[in-house]
Amino acid sequence: MEVNDCLKLISESIDNQKFVKLIFSKPSGKSSDLKNIYARKIHLKSKDVLSCTFRYNTNDQVKNYTISKGLENIEKWIDREFHIATLITTTSDITFKRNKHGIHMIEKKSSHILPSRESIRHNKSKKRFLDLDRSFLYHLGVTDKEGRLIPSKADKYRQIDKYLEIIDALVHDYSFGSTIQIVDMGSGKGYLTFALYDYLTNILKKEVMVFGIESRDELVNFCNEKAEICGFEQLYFQASTIEEFAFPNIDILIALHACDTATDDAIAFGIRSNASIIITAPCCHKQIRQQVKGKKINNSILRHGIFKERQYEMVTDTIRSLMMEKHQFSTKIFEFISNEHTRKNIMLVGTKSQKNANIELIDEEINAIKSEYQIDFHYLEKALQQK
């Protein structure tokens, strides 16, 4: 078959809304630094475009083309620059293989189930906020080279996608300056930090500067290496603790699954740094439970250990919420992701409000909770007193 025949099939799949993505592999030039191109259709700024990820040896680059310009490039890539092109549609997978005798086509029933097939629109109506062909997912080990989800990472993928849904709503509802400055406390291996940077920069087209703070040197080195490979120029990882990190003014403070009082240290840091949004997913809640150990509390609910643990989690996070409200934040506590995927499923989010807080009333609420459960102090109270 001829190049025009390939192009016709690709163009028809786009016109018929069956196009999922197009993968180019096995470059013609042996010395080429470009290894693959991944093309997919997205809806951007009220029009359909072809978004192409160019995967090089050392980094990835993303370029968006009009459909007509994209098809011109595809013709060139099939004809001269790559030996193999794989067209993935909602009904079949078609592979075009070029050699000295011409182009051979192999077609088989579609074998991939991708979230991107549910919707290609990049707005709030789409069911997924994270497409599997995002380059950072491959470099962090969530997908394989073909953009297919690795089964053992399915729960992690769902968590990242839900996280981006939350971020999308928060960012759309808030007004920031020219560059959004973000600090992620306890960034770990960076799954959510990379996703945040990629979504804000490459999907929402916002200027951001993101710092991932992590105490483990090996994870910091790993993440900085992957950020460079992905071409994420404004994403930085630093080996530090919350107490040691110095950054006076930030827009968004994130602390997901920071253990015990580390969540409180992060909240206090965000308040002192004049953050506009504070996003936390509290982890273990030891401070208050250890404090009330041995005290007799006349509450039949607390007779059972499992209920006691859950009750003190709720008490701890409720006081955190009230303390944030004292500092002029509107707060929400909600399920981050279903218990089916993780036990650590509560998220506490605070957004800076223009409304003055009723400090006297909030203090009464906090003191009533402390009195009922015989709590001497909440760690966040002390953390906020530190300079």
Image (cartoon, rainbow, N blue to C red):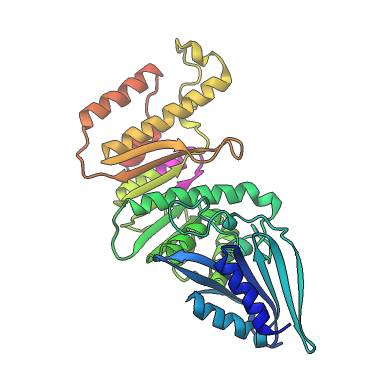
Instruction: Locate residue 131, reporting x and y percent.
Output: 56, 59
Viewer-proximal residue among 263 and 15: 15
Q: Relative to 273, say whether 295 is above or below.
A: above
Count of marks overlaid on the render: 0
Instruction: Locate residue 372, reporting x and y percent.
Output: 38, 17
Viewer-proximal residue among 331 and 269: 331
Viewer-proximal residue among 188 and 194: 194
- Residue drawn at (64%, 59%), measured in percent from left and top? 90
Asked whether, in this view, residue 32 is left or right of residue 310, the answer is: right
Determine if the magenta segment contains residue 331: no
- Residue drawn at (31%, 57%), measured in percent from left and top? 249
Q: Can residue 225 be seen at all in this image of the molecule?
A: no
- Residue drawn at (53%, 35%), measured in percent from left and top? 284
Q: Can residue 286 be seen at all in this image of the molecule?
A: yes
The picture quadrant where one finds residue 37 is: bottom right
Q: Relative to 69, say whether 149 is above or below.
A: above
Instruction: Locate residue 229, reporting x and y percent.
Output: 57, 71
Q: In which quadrant of the rendered image does the N terminus lie?
A: bottom right
- In magenta, the rendered stretch is 255-265
Asked whether, in this view, residue 193 is left or right of residue 349, the answer is: right
Viewer-proximal residue among 164 and 311: 164
- Residue drawn at (53%, 78%), measured in percent from left and top? 70
Q: Residue furthest right?
A: 101
Asked whether, in this view, residue 260 is left or right of residue 352, the answer is: right
Asked whether, in this view, residue 254 is left or right of residue 15, the answer is: left
Q: Relative to 261, say whether 156 is above or below.
A: below
Instruction: Locate residue 157, reporting x and y percent.
Output: 59, 51
